[in-house]
Image: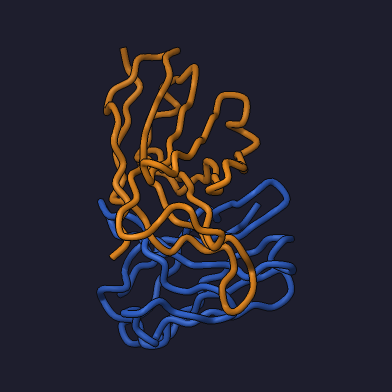
Chain colours: A blue, B orange
């Protein structure tokens, strides 16, 4: 299982960290997805700290022990969305419960 | 450009079987670099992993759905399919198909890098 805070808020232009905890994060990197209302999830960070083409460099990933983090440096209004972590585990794959990010 | 597109009924009756197919275009499904997977999202809820299939036919299933679930692949048609039996209202969700990296090395680690737009399946009589 992967555990995320249900909701986080950040002031426009400030930095925010969204975390994801799970035992298998000690073995596998998490991937992170952004989902806006009515849209499919979009991969934004994967591996040690990689971004698909087109994802702004204000999004970054890190990991320590059983916790993976997604950091948004200089949050923009368009970053308001749900964010999900995802990783392999003993049963296959799992998603965190999601974090709703509000940009104030 | 890789695209995934689901097809299948949008309405299924309780106790019947939900069947969806995901057609892959722009890439071959017969690659050892990727799995092909299904994820669903109940209304107002988070993402739930359903299962993945490899081009060889080997599968990974969610433990909570395993007894009702079959995921298969047809390499000749470049598509993969999901069948979920004995559905209830709890299976009402938007169903997505996705491409999933099959390894954790070289900068990649089992991420889902391409997703379909999603299709709503409602279970109701």
Whether residue A5 is visible, yes or no, is: no
Residue A66 versus residue B18 in the image, above or below: below
Whether residue B75 is visible, yes or no, is: yes
Residue B9 at what x, y percent from top left? 28, 26
Q: Is residue A52 left or right of residue A91?
A: left
Q: Which residue lies furthest to the front in this view?
A: B76
Of residues B88 and B77, the one nearer the viewer is B77
Of residues B18 and B125, the one nearer the viewer is B18
- Quadrant location of the C terminus of chain B? top left
- Quadrant location of the N terminus of chain B? bottom left
Of residues B96 and B88, the one nearer the viewer is B96
Of residues A30 and A2, the one nearer the viewer is A30
Residue A94 at what x, y percent from top left? 59, 51
Residue B49 versus residue B123 in the image, above or below: below
Q: Which residue is drawn at 60% across and 79% down?
A: B106
Number of numbered labels in the structure image: 0
Residue A15 at what x, y percent from top left? 43, 85
Residue B52 at what x, y percent from top left? 54, 46
Q: Which residue is drawn at 53% across and 53% down?
A: B35
Q: In this view, does B63 lie to the left or right of A53?
A: right
Q: Residue at x 56, y 48 (%)?
A: B54
Q: Residue at x 28, y 50 (%)?
A: B117
Q: In this view, does B15 lie to the left or right of A42?
A: right
Residue B89 location, quadrant: top left
């Amino acid at each position: 299982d992967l555990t995320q805070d249900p909701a986080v808020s950040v002031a426009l232009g400030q930095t925010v960290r969204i975390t994801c905890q799970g035992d298998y994060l000690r073995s596998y990197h998490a991937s992170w997805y952004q989902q806006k209302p009515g849209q499919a999830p979009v991969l934004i960070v994967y591996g040690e700290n990689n971004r698909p083409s087109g994802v702004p460099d204000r999004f970054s990933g890190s990991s320590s022990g059983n916790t993976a983090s997604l950091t948004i440096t200089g949050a923009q209004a368009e970053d308001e969305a749900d964010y999900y972590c995802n990783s392999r585990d003993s049963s296959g794959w799992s998603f965190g419960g999601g974090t709703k990010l509000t940009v104030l | 450009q890789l695209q995934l597109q689901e097809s299948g009924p949008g309405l299924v009756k309780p106790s019947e079987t939900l069947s969806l197919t995901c057609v892959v275009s722009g890439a071959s499904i017969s690659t050892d670099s990727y799995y092909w997977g299904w994820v669903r999202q109940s209304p107002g809820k988070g993402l739930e992993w359903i299962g993945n299939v490899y081009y060889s036919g080997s599968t990974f299933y969610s433990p909570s759905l395993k007894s009702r679930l079959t995921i298969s692949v047809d390499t000749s048609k470049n598509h993969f399919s999901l069948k979920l039996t004995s559905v209830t209202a709890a299976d009402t969700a938007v169903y997505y198909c996705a491409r999933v990296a099959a390894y954790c090395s070289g900068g990649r680690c089992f991420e889902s890098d391409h997703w379909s737009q999603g299709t709503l399946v409602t279970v109701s009589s």
